[in-house]
């Protein structure tokens, strides 16, 4: 039986990934905060015998940012990834792959990005993602490392839509700020199977954009969701209002990128929900 050590196993993405992998015959060993606080030797012993390590954990970004919150967002990713990289490389027979999450926030808001793009963001999220990936890449001397750059995950019981659906169902939804910013989405089903895909495909390494192939902006998202719900969706959410609510954290909501999943497509990954309409329709049908 194949074994994977998984952080974030109780989270929105991790819980679904765990369920799918167990159905495929994987044995899942969840990694909790206590596994990190117990020290490197405990972590090494826990990872011993794992075929793969998947690291998804991190303090939620969509909240009001204070200096303390920003530090927690940063350290919850950097320190855990650093500990995993060290533990992996200290094991006599390390796992064959280390899949350590990142995000499309690494890219700036201009142009269209694939994995070869060098136009990276210089804000807090951009720096976070760059440092996050660097900590994971420290393990490439002893194992294959993959950095999934994950977009906005669409699912029925969490993520971006958990906050948006109730508003749109009341007919109060609309584009955020200008609505012209990119909306790099991926259905939860496709994300989970893409994560399994990169674990099992031994030729894939480095950054992998985990977004659907359709390029859309936030205005198109609002229009499509409103149409599927048969509700108006023209009330814009002012950027100033978001800044009042979330402070500097509003940049994570107002910004957006146009991103292509070039590497997944090159290696033959098949999306089940390649368009925004199909992805939203599926989520809505399961959340009624």
Image (cartoon, helix red, strand yellow):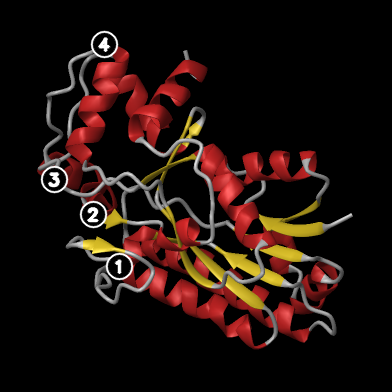
The number of callouts visible is 4
In the image: residue 37, left or right of residue 46: left
**Secondary structure beneath label 1:** helix
Residue named by callout 4: 230
Looking at the image, is mark 3 or mark 2 nearer the viewer? 3
Q: Residues within 10 Å of mark 4 (few under 14, many from 20)?
A: few
How far apart marks 4 and 3 lie (CA) works out to 23 Å
User: Percent from the top left, x then y, of residue 2?
Assistant: 84, 57
Tell me which label, 2 or 4, sits earlier in the chain.
Answer: 4
How far apart marks 2 and 4 lie (CA) works out to 29 Å
**Secondary structure beneath label 3:** loop
- CB under 8 Å between discs 4 and 3: no
**Secondary structure beneath label 4:** loop
Q: Residues within 10 Å of mark 1 (few under 14, many from 20)?
A: some
Answer above or below: position of 273 versus 234: below
**Secondary structure beneath label 2:** helix
Q: Residues within 10 Å of mark 3 (few under 14, many from 20)?
A: some
Q: Residue at x 25, y 20 (%)?
A: 226
Residue named by callout 2: 251
In the image: residue 203, left or right of residue 249: right
Q: Quadrant of residue 197?
A: bottom right
User: Percent from the top left, x then y, of residue 148?
Assistant: 50, 61
How far apart marks 3 and 1 lie (CA) works out to 21 Å
């Amino acid at each position: 039986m194949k074994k994977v050590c998984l952080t974030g196993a109780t989270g929105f993405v991790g819980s679904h990934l765990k369920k799918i992998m167990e159905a495929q015959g994987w044995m899942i060993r969840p990694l909790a905060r206590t596994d990190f606080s117990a020290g490197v030797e405990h972590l090494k012993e826990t990872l011993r015998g794992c075929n793969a390590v998947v690291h998804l954990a991190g303090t939620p970004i969509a909240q009001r940012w204070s200096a303390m919150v920003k530090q927690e967002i940063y350290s919850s990713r950097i320190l855990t990834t650093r500990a995993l990289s060290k533990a992996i490389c200290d094991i006599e027979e390390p796992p064959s792959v280390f899949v350590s999450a990142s995000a499309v926030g690494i890219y700036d808001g201009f142009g269209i990005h694939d994995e070869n793009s060098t136009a990276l963001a210089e804000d807090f999220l951009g720096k976070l993602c760059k440092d996050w990936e660097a900590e994971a890449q420290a393990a490439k001397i002893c194992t294959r490392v993959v950095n999934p750059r994950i977009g906005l995950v669409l699912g029925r019981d969490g993520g971006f839509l958990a906050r948006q659906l109730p508003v749109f169902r009341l007919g109060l939804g609309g584009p955020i700020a200008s609505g012209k910013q990119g909306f790099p989405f991926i259905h939860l089903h496709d994300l989970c199977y893409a994560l399994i895909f990169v674990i099992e495909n031994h030729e894939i390494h480095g950054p992998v954009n985990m977004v659907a192939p359709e390029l859309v902006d936030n205005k198109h998202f609002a229009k499509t969701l409103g149409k599927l719900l048969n509700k108006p969706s023209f009330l814009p959410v002012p950027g100033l209002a978001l800044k009042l609510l979330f402070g500097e954290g509003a940049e994570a909501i107002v910004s957006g990128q146009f991103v292509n999943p070039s590497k997944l497509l090159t290696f033959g990954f098949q999306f089940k929900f390649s368009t925004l309409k199909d992805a939203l329709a599926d989520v809505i049908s399961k959340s009624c």
